[in-house]
Amino acid sequence: MQQNPGIELRVAGQADVDAAAELFRGYLDFYEVEVTDPDRPRAFLAERIAKDESLVLLADAPGVGTVGFAQVYRAFSSLSMDTAWVLNDLYVAPEGRRTGAGRALLREVLRRAREAGVTGVQLETAYDNKVAQGLYEGRASYARSSTSTSTNSGETFPGRRRVDGVRRREGE
């Protein structure tokens, strides 16, 4: 699967857990999540992949390597009484930014959602992550209110941006 010239995307399997975990740690750092157990991010991703509880996509940039990941969870929409997806995590490492990796990951998630026939894809990001908000606004139908943001591959339904469970580091 290829969405942007030069960016190669793949579904992460057990062989990709270390690469995905490195990006996941970067994602957690970006959101200032304090991780007390350094092995926890890898274990968390390994478990999601092994149990097929999430779809993890990886993006490779030529000459740089694996630079981005997206993690999608299956959910349900009460309003449509159907299956929905939550794009909970999308991250591109600094060396992979401006390569189109984030855009390619988002497009692939939306393509797969349409292919799977899900009602929509809820996109979540922090209120202050203007880069992600711009990416999401530019790539899908988008509904905004003062407290929620969502998008989907067909029908708009309520969602939310959140940083639940995030502890700010001391002094920040």
Image: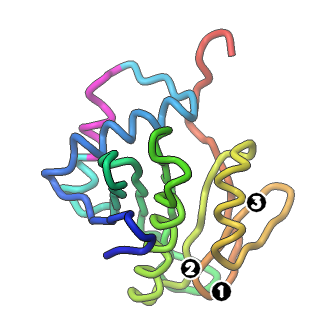
Residue 85, position in %: x, y?
A: 48, 71
Residue 6's place in the image compared with 34, above or below, is below
Comes first in the chain, label 1 or label 3 = 3
Residue 71: image quadrant is bottom left
Q: Is residue 43 magenta?
A: yes
Residue under label 3, please give it: 148
What are the residue bounds of the magenta stretch?
37-45
Comes first in the chain, label 3 or label 2 = 2
Comes first in the chain, label 1 or label 2 = 2
| Amino acid residing under circle 3 | Ser
Residue under label 1, please give it: 155
Label 1–label 2 contact, CB within 8 A: yes
Q: Which numbered circle lies on residue 5? A: none
Image quarter where the N terminus lies is: bottom left
Residue drawn at (45%, 40%) of the image = 95
Q: State the colouring used for the structure image.
A: rainbow
**What SS does tag 2 mark?**
loop
Residue drawn at (31%, 48%) of the image = 63
Extreme residue in the top direction? 171
**What SS does tag 1 mark?**
loop
CA separation, marks 3 and 2?
Answer: 15 Å
Residue drawn at (60%, 63%) of the image = 123
CA separation, marks 1 and 2?
Answer: 6 Å
| Amino acid residing under circle 1 | Glu
Q: Is residue 139 left or right of residue 100?
A: right
| Amino acid residing under circle 2 | Gly
Residue 113, position in %: x, y?
A: 45, 80
Q: Is residue 123 left or right of residue 36?
A: right
Residue 115's place in the image compared with 99, above or below, is below
Residue under label 2, please give it: 120
